[in-house]
Image: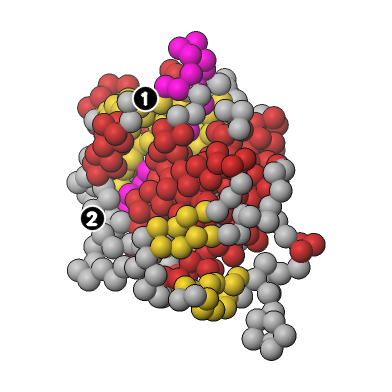
Amino acid sequence: MESGDFSGSRNQVQMLWHNKRKVVLVGLGAESSLNARVIANAQQAAQKTLAKTQSSQAISALALSLNNSDLSQSAVRQLASAAALASYQYTATKSHNPSSALECISIAADEAFHDAVAEGAAIGRGSNLARELGNLPGNVCTPTYLAEQAQALDKQYARLNTTVLEEAEMETLGMGALLAVSRGSRQPAKLITMEYKGAGANDKPICLVGKGLTFDAGGISLKPGAGMDEMKYDMCGAASVFGAIQMACELKLPLNIVAVVPSSENLPDGIAVKPGDVVTSMAGKTIEILNTDAEGRLILCDALEYSRRFDPEVVVDMATLTGACIIALGHHISGLMGNDDELAAELLAAGEAASDPAWRLPINDDYQQQLKSNFADIANIGGRPAGTITAACFLARFTEDYRWAHLDIAGTAWKSGAHKGATGRPVPLLSEFLLARAGK
């Protein structure tokens, strides 16, 4: 530091040698602004440097200076999660797989942080599962593939029970909205349910609902061609549910959780649903489809109605639902809406604790007026103004009888450009929410 080669600024990395071992210094910046996210980012910066070396093992000492406090527990949890996230590499569809030599990261920490390390590692692995599912191309990750992954989790964890409904069963249940979206695709839609039993039989479950559009071309209301490849990420809501369920299974959380994933493709075809068509949802409400590219809310409304049969304590859905959310909040913060203040506050607090933040938007009755239809009970779009809010208002029509929150992750679920790839969000937020519910 005296030589000026290293200043300790945030995420600055300096490699040294000591007794034939590499020592990586990583800057944390000013002590006054130190927080859990700073420490997690430093862990990732150090691992990026190590990945370029031939080191197969490393020990992180970042946690050693932390005292045993609530902030420190959160910091260690995020540090362990960051270590897992930094280890992720996508190789599934590459013929040449350049892999890091780094095989093992150990975290040196006080014994009081043992649970925090285990929880953070599970959150990181859950996030990586969500990233992997999101990054897979649409010709690999189909609704059938998602169903197979759910069944694989079922075999791996004794507390998990998976069921998959086929289109004929959905038709019997009256899921006309979900099936309308899948009509243009040769891939059959699936309704995937994963039930995790970690608490008593009389304990009401937490229900997580994830939008699973494995590819979204917009249907007859076709999207522009530029960037359409990124519509493989339209199932990141479903992917985050998978990640959260895996985390709960790993940690054996004392909760009952039900994951509901409606999955389909949205493609143009001669029998695809058309603008102006009217369909009937499972709830019996008729919907005028003014834009076939507003399809996420169609598959979600039937899934939300289906969730009612589990008599849930609360229902949280997550979806890459609206481009309007990116205009409102950018790529840093997810949108949050819901019909229960206490539940919304829980989720906001979980996002802050996990450095996976959300921001609450209103869904009062004034916005419902934009969804009026002359030909059905409700229109599937409400025009350009407040597009994120009116999409949530549409879903609110199907959640009036239980406590519900909606996360719009359109801006946070993946990155574009040179660093294109799924982020795994909002698995950290969901994990913190579940951990808090479990008393951790």
Report the side of 304 relative to 222 (left or right): right
Q: Is residue 321 above or below residue 205?
A: below
Give x and y (percent) for residue 265. 30, 47
Report the side of 180 relative to 4 (left or right): left
Instruction: Give the quarter of the figure containing the N terminus.
Output: bottom right
Stretch of the chain drawn in magenta = 197-216
Give x and y (percent) for residue 149. 28, 41
Report the side of 8 relative to 383 (left or right): right
In this view, the residue farthest toward the top is 202
| Helix, strand or loop for disc 1 | loop
Q: Residues within 10 Å of mark 1 (few under 14, many from 20)?
A: some
Residue indicated by mark 1: 159
Q: Nearer the viewer, residue 187 or 162?
A: 162
Q: Is residue 71 above or below residue 251?
A: below
Q: Is residue 337 above or below residue 167?
A: below
Residue type marked 2: Asn
Q: Which mark is residue 139?
A: 2
At x 65% / y 81%, what residue is drawn?
6
Quadrant in the picture for residue 191: top left
